[in-house]
Amino acid sequence: MKSTWDTIKQQVSTKMPARGFQLWINPICFVEHKGKQVILGCPNRFSKSWVEENYLDLIHNQFKAQGHQGVDLVFKVERPKKSPAPDPTHEQLPLPHMPKTHRRPSLWLNSQFTFDRFIVGQSNAFAYSASKTIALGDQFNYHSLLMMSNTGLGKTHLSQAIGHSILKKDPQTRIFYMTAEDFANEMITSLKQNRIEAFKRRYRTSCDVLLLEGIHFLDGKEKVQAELGYTLDALATDNKKIIFTSAMAPKDIPRISRNPRSRFTAGLVTTITGPDYPTRVDILKKKAIDYQVKLSGDVVHFLAQRLERDVRQMESALKCLKARAELMGAPIDMDAAREVVRALVSGACALAPKDVKQLVCGYYKVAPEVLSSASRKKAHAYPRNIYAYLARTHLDATLAQIGKEINRSHSTVLYSAELIGKKIKQDRQIHHQIQFLSQKIEEMKK
């Protein structure tokens, strides 16, 4: 049950703001499992009361998603036990030349975030190439890189991979890795303690590579922006390497001054979008090996079709499947995959165009490749049109996604669906066929 709670915490982290999760949910520890009663420990009374009032339903729903329907959650005040020795396969590497007074364990370089562990696809190929160029310092000699993306798409992985690569080449390189928020907090602390000159020297003269995460946090912080601008000017003058990450383009960050904004975009600028289908397949296969989860080809492709948001969503699905197999002895099959998808993909049905295509082919006794062929025979075109109508009616999929399954354009899908829609009103036989198939699709969703 402890591993189940760890999985649930990971899921909850994707459903609420990071600050709220770190403050209220992350400190909760698993205490005991008695029958249907699961006891969780909160660090203090206030935390216990707040979690019970604000997050009880959220946590309870996640237990249900894991297959624990009748769980009785009990919260008690109990501090987490001291963590065991870290797993060497997931150790965090502290950066050299960083005084312990300034270093936070959460901001060490993660040993897993290296270039050889990054899955390259169409959505991130340029960001990967630009990162390697910055890290290796080849003939192009670029010194600055800005990577923009939503969370969970790999910008932090690439940022840290740059740090690993540079340190491997020269372990004496002075690398500072931090968030913009921590830069701001450290500056404020230095001002209060009359150490601002030491702070300036630390970043302007004692830094060879600056890895700065989340620059969108600087919104409205005028004094921090000014100091960071001077720091970036000093680093750029000395040709030091600077890597930024952001959830939005600098031009879209409100209340940010001209100097830092221009510095953010002075070098290479790249955007990472959501992984395409082939890349998601590769990511799932790689992550399944990492988590020691055996997946059939059908399950891999099923998950890749539906988990389109980011890598964290795919990791969460794999952890859920592994927990179900370990704790409940349940096989990792299509039924398990569908249940996990329902829990992770909010508001989306667990069916894809491929499923509807298989249903239609089975009903009309035609081979799946026939629907994708160029044949215009009535025996082939009719089930193809039926598929287009059913997929458009019952799935949360785009016309392009529906058309891709039968090798047709979105306009052809639209025409086919409208054609069947008209025939339903005119032909009782077609009406009954659609009614029967629609019922089967709804049963498949459950």
Image (cartoon, rainbow, N blue to C red):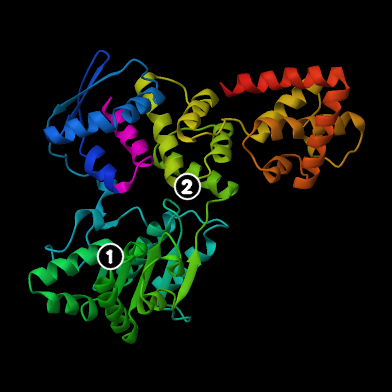
Identify which residue is drawn at 34% across, 15% down.
70
Q: Is residue 76 left or right of residue 270?
A: left
Percent coordinates x, y for residue 233 in the rendering: 32, 83
Q: Is residue 26 left or right of residue 136?
A: left
What is the three-letter code of the residue carrying label 2?
Asp
For the N terminus, the image quarter is top left
Mark 2 vs mark 1, CA separation in Å? 23 Å
From what the image shows, is residue 81 above or below residue 231? above
Whether residue 98 can be seen here:
no
Q: Residues within 10 Å of mark 2 (few under 14, many from 20)?
A: some
Does the residue at mark 2 contact the one at mark 1 (Cβ under 8 Å)? no
Does residue 8 belong to the magenta stretch?
A: yes
Percent coordinates x, y for residue 412 in the rendering: 80, 44
Q: Nearer the viewer, residue 190 or 131?
A: 190
Identify which residue is drawn at 16% across, 39% down.
84
In the picture, residue 172 is in which quadrant? bottom left
Q: Looking at the image, which residue sits at the far right?
A: 377
Identify which residue is drawn at 10% across, 69% down.
192
Identify which residue is drawn at 84% across, 34% down.
419
Which label was assigned to residue 177? 1
Q: Is residue 357 left or right of residue 248?
A: right
Secondary structure mainly formed by the magenta segment? helix
Residue numbers of the magenta segment: 1-18
For the C terminus, the image quarter is top right
Q: Secondary structure at mark 1?
A: strand
What is the three-letter code of the residue carrying label 1?
Tyr
Residue that numbered label 2 is attached to: 310
From what the image shows, is residue 238 above or below residue 55? below
Percent coordinates x, y for residue 370 in the rendering: 82, 34
